[in-house]
């Protein structure tokens, strides 16, 4: 069937609400991407509520533009809109629906103002201050309402019937000594917004209070019948200047406080007279201002009525700074307080740690802060304590010193390091070690070296005299025996502990026996490894000797030296067993021979005819 050369238009763009009020919305959209080949003649607009599935046409008129004002909406309801384009071919598909929008005034009530602060507090008045809300809801703020509430009540009471414009408000007619919270509500054309966070609680009272407590009184002077004290004003004067201080005293044997002087004191010092000698007193102070007397301070430290000095405090704990077999030198520091009278001398006592009895360590008065205590017994431990003396008498003893042993001022050395073994031969080895970490306080005078065979538990000293160096060539060893070595250091105090034993090491020639590599009826091939040490000069060749196993006589297997470490010995006798040994040669000459090879029979190889 033939059809027109055009089609219905595509869907227009998704509508957008660009203006709204409580009973209308203005929507706009974009034309369809395709008009289907025929110009769009008009648009059809439908609306619905988001929870409904039913769309209704908003107007019967043909809408020619891409904007339209939808009227007769119900305030407070949400609406969605979609649009379809129409051309000669008919109505095209509807657009995607607009986002839901509420029919309402184009602004909201304001947000909450800032938390109110309270100032200028008096017995019946307070001033409340706040900050503007973060949002005015889209409409200018018309003013603020202030409400109050007592902490024990849940009911907020509005203070002003008409909104106030300033950000401050003086609240009057409060009840003295009552406590209050305050909150603020902003209003605009849309109505009242939420209340602010309540203010901190404040009491309606005069703008000053009784002062705080002064500092604890401090005794500055004393004598047989009077004591002087001083104190600091309270941290807070309560908002009204301090006019004076009330001072009370108490005998420490009594619970009763009485006035120290009949009148208030204007200064922060006072001398209390007519006290009783040898009685102990405490003092306390209260500040006074227009609001009345504040709380009392803490009592002073008890003070005895007595002459103005005391025995000294204890000196510092003594240190033992020098030790010998029969004496020790001790030092100490002065007491923190001399009691108000100069120190004349010190008393030093000593005791052994296992004893409870202290005895005087000197005959003469000790004037200095150091003393050499003589007549001690070597090998015994001693402790010391010290007391200071002034015109009031002897003070308490110091903390005792740490115990110290009467002995020579040095110890035996520590253990040397674990010995290292080198330059091994059939009957000799070189033993090397490092000095101990501690020489015990006296120079090391030498070392003793001991050895032990692996089959024995007995250590044998190698030298009678101490070794002065940290290396020793151990001789007269038994070939093929295994040995360990250990070392002791010696100083003026004696011989210290043994080092860790060396690793177990075999006394053997410095290179391995030759190895047979091939055998025939009249020849034998051998190879060997170079010696562990070239003696400090490059090896220039090797001497090879052979012997018939039944003989004790070695003969050269080749008249010249061999440069390689393998060789085939020829012209041997079939059926005889042979051993071979090798010696290395350098510029110093020929070294010792290796161990002999395993005996080897001259015979044709297995299977050869």
Image (tube, rainbow, N blue to C red):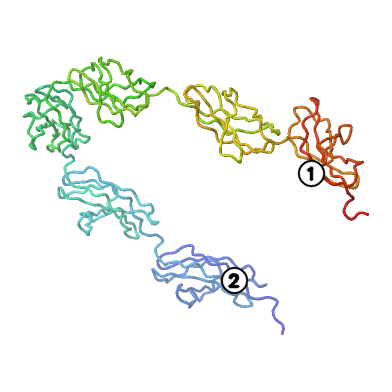
Residue 143 to residue 371: above or below: below
Checking the image for residue 216, the label placed there is none
Give me the residue at 62% from left, 74% from top: 87
Q: Name the quadrant containing residue 292.
A: top left
- Give the residue drawn at x 25%, y 31%: 356
Residue 434, compared with residue 39, is above or below; it is above
On the image, the x and y values in percent for residue 568 come to: 88, 41
Left or right of 57? Residue 558 is: right
Helix, strand, or loop for circle 1?
A: loop
Quadrant of the snapshot with the N terminus: bottom right
- According to the image, label 2 marks what residue? 11
Q: Quadrant of residue 266?
A: top left
Q: Please give the residue where the numbered disc 1 appears in the rendered image.
A: 598
Quarter holding residue 522: top right
Query: As rendered, which of 92 and 473 lies closer to the eye?
Result: 473
Q: With 208 as the anchor, is 25 left or right in this view?
A: right
**On-image quarter of the C terminus:** bottom right
């Amino acid at each position: 069937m033939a059809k027109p050369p055009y089609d219905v238009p595509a869907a227009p763009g998704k509508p957008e609400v660009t203006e709204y009020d409580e009973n209308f919305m203005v929507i706009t959209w974009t034309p369809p991407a395709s008009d289907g080949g025929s110009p769009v003649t008009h648009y059809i607009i439908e609306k619905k509520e988001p929870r409904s599935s039913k769309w209704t046409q908003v107007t019967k008129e043909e809408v020619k533009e891409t904007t339209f004002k939808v009227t007769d909406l119900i305030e407070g309801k949400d609406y969605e809109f979609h649009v379809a384009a129409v051309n000669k071919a008919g109505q095209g598909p509807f657009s995607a629906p607009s986002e839901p929008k509420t029919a309402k005034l184009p602004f909201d009530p304001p947000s909450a103002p800032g938390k109110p602060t309270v100032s200028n507090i008096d017995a019946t008045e307070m001033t409340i201050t706040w900050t503007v809300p973060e949002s005015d809801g889209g409409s200018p703020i018309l003013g603020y309402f202030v409400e109050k509430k007592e902490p024990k009540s849940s009911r907020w009471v509005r203070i002003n019937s008409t909104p106030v414009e300033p950000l401050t408000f003086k609240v009057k007619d409060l009840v003295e000594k009552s406590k209050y919270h305050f909150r603020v509500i902003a209003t605009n054309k849309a109505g009242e917004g939420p209340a602010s966070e309540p203010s901190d609680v404040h009491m309606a009272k005069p703008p000053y209070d009784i002062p705080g407590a002064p500092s604890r009184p401090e005794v500055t002077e004393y004598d047989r019948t009077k004591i002087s004290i001083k104190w600091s004003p309270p941290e807070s004067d309560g908002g009204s200047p301090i006019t004076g201080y009330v001072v009370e005293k108490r005998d420490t044997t009594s619970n009763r406080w009485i006035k120290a002087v009949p009148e208030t004191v204007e200064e922060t010092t006072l001398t209390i007279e007519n006290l009783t000698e040898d009685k102990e007193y405490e003092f306390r102070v209260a500040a006074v201002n227009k609001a009345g007397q504040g709380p009392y301070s803490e009592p002073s430290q008890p003070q005895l009525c007595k002459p103005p000095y005391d025995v000294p405090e204890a000196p510092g704990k003594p240190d033992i700074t020098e030790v010998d077999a029969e004496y020790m030198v001790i030092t100490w520091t002065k007491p923190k307080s001399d009691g108000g009278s100069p120190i004349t001398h010190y008393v030093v006592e000593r005791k052994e740690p296992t004893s409870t009895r202290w005895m005087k360590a000197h005959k003469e008065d000790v004037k200095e802060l150091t003393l050499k205590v003589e007549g001690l017994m070597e090998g015994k431990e001693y402790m010391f304590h010290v007391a200071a003396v002034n015109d009031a008498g002897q003070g308490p003893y110091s903390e005792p010193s740490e115990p110290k042993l009467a002995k020579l001022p040095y110890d035996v050395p520590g253990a040397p390091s674990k010995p290292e073994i080198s330059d091994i031969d059939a009957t000799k080895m070189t033993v090397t070690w490092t000095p101990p970490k501690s020489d015990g306080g006296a120079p090391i005078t030498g070392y003793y070296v001991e050895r032990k065979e692996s089959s024995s538990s007995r250590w044998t000293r190698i030298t009678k005299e101490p070794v002065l160096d940290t290396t020793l060539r151990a001789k007269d060893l038994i070939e093929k025996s295994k040995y360990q070595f250990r070392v002791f250091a010696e100083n003026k105090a004696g011989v210290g502990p043994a080092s860790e034993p060396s690793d177990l090491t075999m006394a053997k020639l410095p290179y391995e026996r030759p190895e047979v590599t091939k055998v025939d009826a009249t020849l034998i091939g051998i190879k060997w490894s170079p010696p562990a040490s070239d003696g400090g000069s490059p090896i220039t060749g090797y001497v090879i000797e052979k012997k018939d196993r039944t003989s004790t006589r070695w003969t050269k297997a080749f008249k010249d030296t061999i440069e390689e470490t393998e060789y085939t010995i020829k012209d041997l006798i079939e059926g005889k067993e042979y051993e071979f040994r090798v010696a290395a040669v350098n510029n110093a000459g020929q070294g010792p021979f290796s161990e002999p090879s395993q005996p080897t029979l001259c015979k044709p190889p297995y299977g050869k005819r």
